[in-house]
Amino acid sequence: MIRAVLIDVDDTLLDFRLCAKASMERAAAKAGIDLPDNATEVFFPLNDSLWKQIETGQMTLDELHRTRWKKVFDALGICGDGEAFEVLFRRELAESAEPTHGARRLLEHLHGRYVLGIASNAPYDQQLHRLQLAGFHTYFRHLFVSERIGAAKPSPAFFEACCRALEPIPPHQILMIGDSLRADVRGAKAAGMKTCWLNRRGEKSDEADYTVSSLEEVLGLL
């Protein structure tokens, strides 16, 4: 029996790609920088690789913020202050909250039936504000964010902190929903939680207890 549900934010409840694309365009306009047409093709793979380093403990969030746009600018051949642009980008990102398809319906379905919590590696204030903009914050009793916990998904310390806060609900009665096999599924599974992998790309894995291709499918599980 599931009594609590933890949900990832980016690429689960909020469409990170849409948010990031709009944010970099607005930041570039304010900075007077002409981003080439292939900017997103460079940014997203590089961003994904940096977040994987955070998940494996090879990089901190501060290091990502210091280096992300410097690396993007270098790859695009842009002469500019990457750290300054990062500040602009994150400021714009904090004001961007595009829900993924089915997110609102899922939260309406879960609210009142389960104890709901956010589980995210992104900055606390940014994620809280984006959830407020989307009108999602009122659905959640807990916001578990690595910046406040002091450890990032998928580390045991992150999920152990979640479990302590959710006591007396035992781990096997907690379900983690997220799009990352490494951060969401493996981390939660190692903590004894049930897992639901949001696999929109049709990848192959049987690691999660449940695998869905859309949030609508979760309605049939809970």
Image: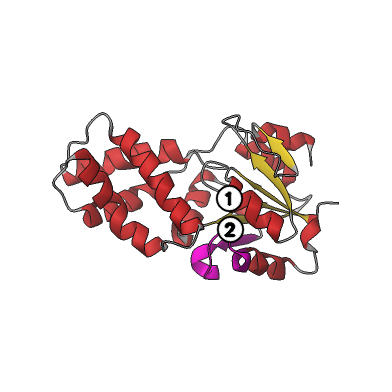
Of all residues, the one furthest to the right in this rendering is 1
* Residue 19 image position (x, y, % from top left): 41, 40
Drawn side of residue 130 relative to residue 187, left or right: left
Is 146 inside the magenta-drawn segment? yes
* Residue 150 image position (x, y, % from top left): 52, 70
Is 211 inside the magenta-drawn segment? no
Task: Give the CA separation, mark 1 to mark 2.
Answer: 7 Å
Residue drawn at x 29%, y 53% is 86
Drawn side of residue 128 relative to residue 187, left or right: left
* Residue 135 image position (x, y, % from top left): 55, 46
Q: Amino acid at mark 1?
A: Arg
Q: Which mark is residue 154?
A: 2
Question: Does 27 appear above or below 60?
Answer: above
Can see residue 44? Answer: yes
Helix, strand or loop status at disc 1: helix
The residue wearing badge 1 is: 182
Question: Magenta part of the protein: which range?
Answer: 142-158
Of all residues, the one furthest to the left in this rendering is 79
Question: Does 160 appear above or below 38?
Answer: below
| Count of picture labels | 2
Can see residue 139? Answer: no
Drawn side of residue 154 relative to residue 211, left or right: left
Do the CB atoms of the residues marked 1 and 2 lie less than 8 Å apart? yes
Q: Nearer the viewer, residue 10 or 68?
A: 68
Q: Quadrant of residue 211?
A: top right
Q: Quadrant of residue 221?
A: top right
